[in-house]
Amino acid sequence: QHQSQCQCQKKNYTLINIMEWFEYNITIFCYICINIEITIMNIGDRIPEVLGIDQDGNEIKSSDYKGRKIILYSYPKANTSGCTAEACSLQTHKAELEAAGYSIIGISKDKKELQKKFADTQGLEFPLIADTDTTLLQQLGCWGEKVACGRRTIGTLRTTYLVNEEGIIEKIFTPKEIKTKIHAEQILEYIHG
């Protein structure tokens, strides 16, 4: 009986190891696949023509903004503290940004309904794209690995792209550069600097 018990324990231990190995390797495999599919956009690149569907069900295209500049910013999750602070900063300074020739477009993985609730609750007067399948996020290169509270996950990287009148990226604010509460001021400082 003692021998049988030991064998069972050994079998369970082996099964746990196999499961851990499988989970680890699937995570790495998925991460590699995601990175292969991502076309990371850099300064000088043209943003995609089709950007997605916004909170009101409108299809947003870059050609709709031809002759205007765009602040295209990605955020991890609607209605969370950091994303709310960032959106409110942009909304508060919307008139100044528009005076400098910029239109604002937000993008996250959230569903259209949540984007709508976010816009209505915070009084946001600009499109919020519901990129639920992460197509645009991956094309831009702001979908990937990040570390939160010591845990590595795959998700939206908070990033801002300043796009010129021809749809060409002229400036990228990376996650480490963005200060959510004063992000509009950061953009204005860059524009006027």
Image (spheres, rainbow, N blue to C red):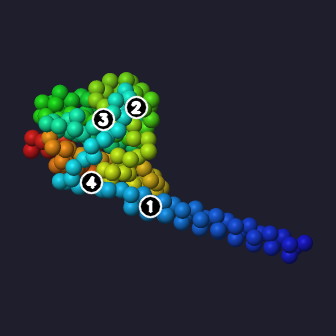
Q: Which mark is residue 60?
A: 3
Residue 91 at x, y percent in the picture: 26, 29
Please report whichever mark, 4 or 2, sits nearer to the chain's N-terminal start. Answer: 4
Regarding residue 189, the answer to whether it shows in the image is: no
Q: Residue at x 49, y 64 (%)?
A: 29
Q: Residue at x 21, y 53 (%)?
A: 45
Q: Check disc 2 and give the amino acid type.
A: Gln
Q: Residue at x 70, y 71 (%)?
A: 14
Q: Check disc 3 and give the amino acid type.
A: Ile
Q: Nearer the viewer, residue 165 or 3?
A: 165
Residue 27 at x, y percent in the picture: 51, 60
Please report whichever mark, 1 or 4, sits nearer to the chain's N-terminal start. Answer: 1
Disc 4 residue crowd, few under 14, some 14–19, many 20+, Cα 10 Å: some
What residue would you read off at disc 4? 41
Please report whichever mark, 3 or 1, sits nearer to the chain's N-terminal start. Answer: 1
**CB-based contact (under 8 Å), mark 2 and mark 3:** no
Q: Which mark is residue 115?
A: 2
Q: Residue at x 13, y 36 (%)?
A: 67
Disc 2 residue crowd, few under 14, some 14–19, many 20+, Cα 10 Å: many
Q: Indicate the secondary structure of the residue bearing disc 4.
A: loop
Viewer-side label of 3, 4: 3
Q: Which mark is residue 33?
A: 1
Q: Nearer the viewer, residue 125 or 56?
A: 56
Please report whichever mark, 2 or 1, sits nearer to the chain's N-terminal start. Answer: 1
